[in-house]
Amino acid sequence: MTRGHPPVVAIGEAKRKAAAKGFTLIAVETDGQLPFDFVINDRGCTSLVRVRRLRYPRYEVPDIGISCAHEIAELRNILVPEEIYRELWVRGPDRHWHRYLVLPDSIEILEDGDDDGKIGKV
């Protein structure tokens, strides 16, 4: 389902970042067979999270729509209830994290108000 090797180091960083943000991390062994890398719960909201590393620092929604088109399409193809969200977490070459909410017809930037600027920085 996914192409290439999963970004194992980035997935580990993302999981640690999620735990540090206070999200409940739900362990799921995907082994690259599912189009998401882990599941989080934040105040009753559950999200399937896909992690992607980028080589170039282009984080605007149109750029993400192009560079992560495959991952976004895979997330959109998951049949889940409306109450479960789909998120794309992107780590750039500067090691900063950027989060996006993947909706059926659009992508939205998720802002965290993170003090260290490493998640939600756009």
Image: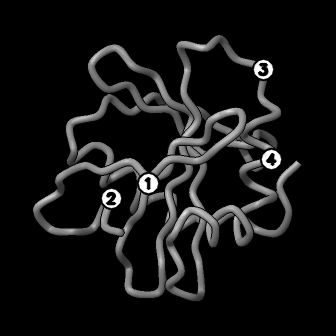
Residue pointed to by mark 2: 120
User: In the image, residue 107 lies at what x, y percent?
Assistant: 59, 47
On screen, residue 78 versus residue 38, left or right, reads: right
Quarter of the image for residue 86 reads: top right
Question: Which tag, 2 or 1, sits closer to the chain's start?
Answer: 1
Q: Nearer the viewer, residue 5 or 43?
A: 43
Residue 87 drawn above or below residue 8: above
User: Label 2's element?
Assistant: loop
- Real-space CA distance between mark 4 and mark 2, rounded to the nearest whole angstrom: 21 Å
Quarter of the image for residue 19 reads: top left
Residue in the picture at 61% in, 14% down: 82
Disc 1 residue type?
Arg
Residue pointed to by mark 1: 99
- Real-space CA distance between mark 3 and mark 4, rounded to the nearest whole angstrom: 12 Å
Q: CB atoms at circles 2 and 1 under 8 Å apart?
A: yes
Residue pointed to by mark 3: 79
